[in-house]
Image: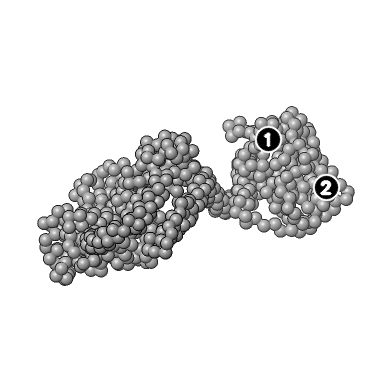
Amino acid sequence: MGLEQADTLKNVERVQNVVYTEQSYLNNMVKDWSCWDDTYHFIEDVNQDYVSVNLQNQTLAGLKVNVMLFVNETGSLVYSKSININTGEEKPIPADLLKLVESGAFSAKSEDDVIRGYVLVDEVPMYISGHPILTTRYEGPMKGTLIFGRYFDGDLLDYFRENTRSSILMYRADEDMPPEFQAKFQNISNFHEGVIVEPLSEARIAGYFELMDVSGQPALIIRTDFPRDLYLNSKRTLNSMYFFLLLTGLVTGVGVKFALDNFFVSRLVEIDNFVTRVRSEKDLSRRLDLKDNDELYRLAREINGMMNEIELAEQELKTQAREKKVLLDSLNEMVIFVNPQLNIVWANKAALEYMHMNLEKAKGIHLKDTPGMSGPLVEYLPLGEIFASGNKESGEFTAGDGNSWFIQATPVTDEDGRIIGVLETFRDITGKKAVEKLLQEKQIAEIANRTKSEFLANISHELRTPLNSIIGFSDLLCEQIFGELNEKQLKYAGNISKSGKHLLNLINDILDLSKVEAGKMELDYTEFELAGKLNIIKNLLSPIADRKKIQIEIDVDSRLTNVYADEARFAQIMYNLVDNAIKFASENSPVKVGARMKGDKVEITVTDIGAGIKTEDQHKLFKPFSQVDSFASKQHQGTGLGLYLVKQIVQMHGGYVWFRSIPGEGSTFAFAIPINGRKNDSNDTVPQTKEQNS
């Protein structure tokens, strides 16, 4: 009875551990949320951002929290939420729970105070865990109390039954319960460790224990019952002893009768010697050879048949063992089997190579003493607790050398369900983690890029309206429609118009950039005359070129007439390239624009004679917001968007961009697009004969 009592207490403790694990999870969760700067500020200003980001129904369901209550330092309820964690639907807060909040039962009295226990609300019992609201550094002053609640409902009881493989019944202290439970409820405090153990029947035995409310009083009584294995095994053993004694007496009587026959005794001795030799030599190939058709002959025949079956079974077991060894040795992950004393029983090839030893040397070594194995690596999973609970455990661990491991420990049982060892596997997931990190960083970068593009588009739209007004009114002032202006006023009005137009061009470039990066820029193909369009660009930029006494020279292949492309975007490309050439060309030097046929494409070059671009600065070209001149020393206006947009628009046409530049001599920028507007699979790759690509 003492062994059965101890075994049942151990099983009850296993059930209690599962219950206490769920409670500890809720305790740790509320402590983590309550000691958080965001929660600390929320209890003061109840900001909507905190609610929309952190208090979604799906968030509570994922945390397995039915109720959240935010109570300030005065005991007033600041915010509350209740959901069904199975469906994610919002539910009303139980009235009994709100009354307890108003009474101050859930308000922490100090920074070290905690509230834990069960509350018997109308629907089902609820486990409550509360913690003072502090900063992330666990510092005060305390701003109130955060309370998490989890219903102790049928789903949770089913989870406990499944994990402990036990039958579990529960009754509330505030409701009628069967007399059996009532008697245990009144006397349970008088028993060791607060657990009552009593047999339910010949086949099952039960354990009773209580769960307390937030004030420390009994709230629930739970009964869990188990098979009476020890009792039944003892009973079977006793019956077997009676049968053994009876059988022994019978065999003894028969033996005495046949012992009178020397012939029988000699043959029996021969059988005994045969069995002894087989057992000592472990030679299953031997066979017993007895003559005569009597009982001993038939016994010898059965022994030979049994030897055949044993030999075949042994060969099959050896074959299976070899197959298992080959299979496990082929695994890249390490596999180690340990007994209840945590000594190694078996290890696969990968584990033995990691430990730098063979299997014979590894057998019997304590797991913590294995050479080559990192202490924290083998100690990450609590194998002692796994032997006690019988639950499979797993987790990820990062060693001191930076390698990440996935570790899993699986209990191995015999036919009677007793744990005889634990099979522990170690898989190196460093590469997998690196890939996951890269994917996460890629997603973050993509989100940031989309956010940037949306911001640029929105701010560009917002700025264009007032800028158009500024430009319009300044132009009216310059035209002196509303009255004459003196020379200084005309100069200032002209400066306003000029600066506004420059800023508007900049905003238009930013808007184009956002469209390109968002994939929303579309091309409007039309047919236009190439030479005429180039001359229009020349006329637009001639006033700027005249200031530096620069001549714009255009040379178009006579075979080129019309081009099928987006006319406005083509003009934007040419304006950017010719404007850049004028900016960086030397005074009294020409800027040459050439157009020639190149297969089914038209290639246009813009060449200037000037300072050129240093080799170390050429990588900055065609990148957004990147300029050859540094911010502190640049001599020319611009944002660095022009060439980037040129490249994107050309690629959208199915063409490519290239350039060459010689420091001290000048630069040539060129692009090629299909003449008839048909796109192909070309990207910005340029022919190998070109000196630089984009």
Task: Please state which amino acid type lies under the numbered disc 2.
Answer: Lys
Q: Are marks 2 and 1 in contact (CB under 8 Å)?
A: no
Name the residue nearer the viewer: 256 or 70: 256
- Disc 2 to disc 1, how far (Cα)? 26 Å
The label on residue 618 is 1
Query: Which residue is located at x 68 percent, y 35 percent?
Result: 618
Q: Position of residue 135 (x, y in %)?
A: 30, 44
Say left or right for 331 vs 240: right
Query: Would you say residue 29 is visible in this rendering?
Result: no
Name the residue nearer the viewer: 625 or 108: 108
**Which quadrant of the figure has residue 587?**
top right
Name the residue nearer the viewer: 38 or 387: 387
Say left or right for 606 vs 314: right
The residue indicated by pointer 2 is 598
Q: Earlier in the sequence, mark 2 or mark 1?
A: 2
Q: Position of residue 188 (x, y in %)?
A: 14, 59
Point out the residue furthest to the top here: 664
Up-down: is 287 above or below 364?
A: below
Question: Which colouring convention does the figure follow?
Answer: one colour
Say left or right for 376 vs 243: right
**SS class of the residue under badge 1?**
helix
What quarter of the picture does the C terminus occupy? top right
